[in-house]
Image: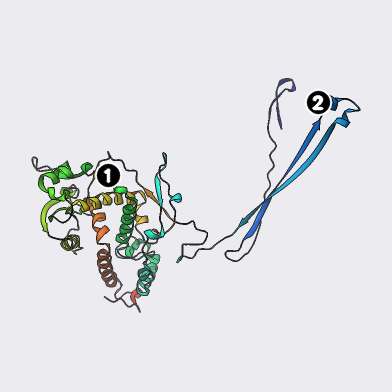
Amino acid sequence: QNVMGKDDVILATAPTLSIREVKTYARIANDTPFIVGGLIAKDSEETLRKVPVLGDLPWLGGLFRSKDETGLKREVIIVITPSVLPDESPVHASMPKDDDLFDKFGNRLFRDAYRIRAEDTFDLRYLTENKGLRQLQEVVDRIVNDHPQLTKQYPYQRFADQAVPGEDALVRRQIYEVLKRQKAAEVLDVEKLIFFEREEASGSGFRVRFLSDYLKEFAPFVFEEGETGKAVGLCFRMRRDSMAIDQLLEEPVPEIKVVDCPDAQTWRSLLLESNKRSPGSVSKRVIFLRNQSDLNRLKNAILMKKIISLNASDYILKLKNFTRGRLLRMPTVREEDVELIDADVATCYFQSELYYSVLEQSLAYDYAALRKVLQGSEYGKGLRITH
């Protein structure tokens, strides 16, 4: 097509477009290849050979020149092999191998991403395939289907939609393992970690305090290697559900105390008892730092919090979503960044070590709560819920 101007002058020439649509209908078995359609291209080539001057002579020029014509026909066939993946087996033969090539690091405009590998996930079939747990999940799914307003209420949300009580702790531990293998926390500088300290002079509000400065003054043993016999604890009291105005700014400010901690077993016991769920009392998140190793765990906990935030906590902290092959968005960390230690970091710190204890406590606590609400209801009939 030509675009004409004044006096029939050709101003522009548009190429001719040819669009062809091919529809293929097929009913085939799983993993069976079939041809959707094909593209055919024809190329023709003409080659002229001649002797200079003599090949251009009239009548006799044909004796001094030759012409060759060749044709090429290409056909591109599109073959598709559909594969239906069952829910129980997300890994298929067509899935790429676990390789660093599929990670996305060093982008300038987009966030880094890490492809979850088989080594990053735990074998939890003993949990996810448990008949008792599945029965409870099915009952709760029926309840929230009949009463949608209960979907986000406790204890229903702990079982609905394939949820597993305590699964968030298992996912946090798996994220921690990813960070350890990547050595991602090495970029963070301990000198740039901060927390909020209550302002003693005014008696209200708080000020920023660098963790390293506080430790150098009151707990220098934390910078040593190995067991030191003591630990410094940072306790955050969870006030997010409180309606009292005077408690609004209490959660970010930790209570700090130095305690005796002769060995690793005592450290684990301190963590477990201090973070245990207690009905009727204010929930706490507590960190205990003994030595340089615990500081490294704290840096990993800060990155865990960032990863969970980037990937949406409601989504990534579910076992059904933390699976092999998925991309995990990773935070961009710079050595000069200043990072805050808060209750969410404390949760990651605690659950990165005692994830299995959290799972046991959550199962027992949530089972008891669900048993209580189902007792005597039509949904609880014929359902055996044991301690």
**Callout 2 environment at 10 Å: few (<14), some (14 to 19), or many (20+)?**
few
Quarter location, residue 125: bottom left
| Side (left or right) of 55 relative to 356 | right
- Residue shown at the point (33%, 75%) measured from the top left: 380
Identify the mark nearer the N-term, 2 or 1: 2
Q: Quadrant of the N terminus?
A: top right
SS label for mark 2: loop
The circle on residue 74 is none
Q: Is residue 193 left or right of residue 170?
A: left
What SS does tag 1 mark? loop
Mark 2 to mark 1: distance in Å? 75 Å
Reading the image, the residue beneath label 1 is: 188
Type of the residue with mark 2: Pro
Q: Residue furthest bottom?
A: 382
On screen, 27 above or below 39?
below
Q: Nearer the viewer, residue 49 or 311?
A: 49
Q: Nearer the viewer, residue 206 or 219?
A: 219
For residue 97, side relative to residue 14 (left or right): left
Q: Does the CB distance between marks 2 and 1 fall below 8 Å?
A: no
To which residue does mark 2 refer?
52
Which one is nearer the viewer's eye here, 133 or 214? 214
Instruction: Pinpoint residue 321: horizontal percent, then vertical percent.
Output: 40, 58
